[in-house]
Image (cartoon, helix red, strand yellow):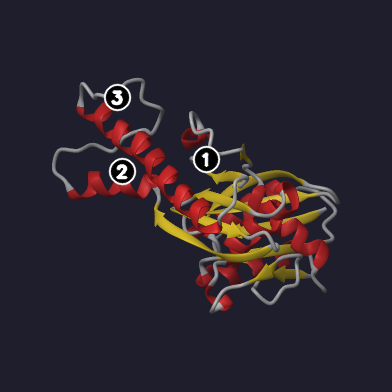
Amino acid sequence: MIALFDIGNTHTHVGLAGKRRALRHVNIPTASWGRAEADEALTAFLGRSRIEGAALCSVVPGRTSDVMAAFARFASKPCIQLTHECEAGIGIDYPRPETIGPDRLANAIAAKERYGAPCVVVDFGTAVTFDVVDRAGCYVGGVIAPGISAMTDYLHEKTALLPRIELRDPDTAIGKNTEQAMRIGAVRGYRGLIREILGGIRGQMGVRKLPVVATGGYAGLIATEMPEIAAVDPMLTLEGLRLVWERCPR
């Protein structure tokens, strides 16, 4: 089994993979690494699995060493950290490849493998990111926008009367109370944002067929009623890390 660590701003997605696919995962708060609670959660998740090694990507450099130290206490096996220098089956056509978020590279690697090229990944995390793979199979860039929960949390935190809301699909286009109005603005408005950005990407690439795969916490919610999104793949980033382990020298 291979351990997989996708260290995000809010959560670290920890996975276990076999030889062909990522099998299961758990979320551990990123802020908890370096403390007993994270070690306990990792031990409970990995259990008695026979670990051959690990692959890791991180957008929180200050926590990367904590995660690697926690894994080292569990298993003295190699841990590959994904960077732009890893040869994992995708080209990079980008001015400063060292600035690409490694989680975005992991998404692109997995999407190209599963859905072919060209393709687009939309990842609904703390930010929503769009990552584009061209016809030649190269990562060529993307888009970053505020995440849906960041947007609604901001409204709550910066206003006196707007509440924190639970995000779900609204059943109307006109809100009859504050919470309903906020859900419409968030969910329907976010779908409009996704459509507009995807339309621009498709137009610039000049392609008719452009598979779009969604991943991340709110992918399922936003993808509903969006035929532009071909698939929702919750394990996409972890699958990219599995491919990194399989393909990169160690």
The disc, 3 or 2, on the residue closer to the chain's N-terminal end is 2
- Dividing the picture into quarters, in which one does residue 232 lie? top right
Q: Is residue 80 found left or right of 182 in the rendered image?
A: right
Q: Residue at x 61, y 38 (%)?
A: 230
Tag 3's secondary structure?
Answer: loop
Q: Are marks 3 and 1 in contact (CB under 8 Å)?
A: no
Q: For the residues carrying marks 3 and 1, which lies nearer the camera in this image?
A: 3
Q: Residues within 10 Å of mark 3 (few under 14, many from 20)?
A: few
Q: Amino acid at mark 1?
A: Ala
Q: Amino acid at mark 2?
A: Thr
Q: Residues within 10 Å of mark 1 (few under 14, many from 20)?
A: many
In whole angstroms, how far apart are the C-alphas of marks 3 and 2? 18 Å
Q: Residue at x 53, y 38 (%)?
A: 228
Disc ID at residue 173: 3
Foreground residue among 27 and 114:
114
In whole angstroms, how far apart are the C-alphas of marks 1 and 2? 16 Å
> In this figure, which residue is indicated by the disc labeled 2?
152
Seen in the picture, residue 87 relative to 16 is either above or below; the reply is below
Tag 2's secondary structure?
Answer: helix
> In this figure, which residue is indicated by the disc labeled 1?
219
Q: Is residue 244 found left or right of 233 in the rendered image?
A: right
Foreground residue among 159 and 114:
114
- Dividing the picture into quarters, in which one does residue 247 lie? bottom right
Q: Are marks 1 and 2 in contact (CB under 8 Å)?
A: no
In whole angstroms, how far apart are the C-alphas of marks 3 and 1? 21 Å
| Horizontal and vertical percent position of residue 115 | 71, 47
The disc, 3 or 1, on the residue closer to the chain's N-terminal end is 3
| Horizontal and vertical percent position of residue 8 | 52, 58
Q: Amino acid at mark 3?
A: Ala
The disc, 1 or 2, on the residue closer to the chain's N-terminal end is 2
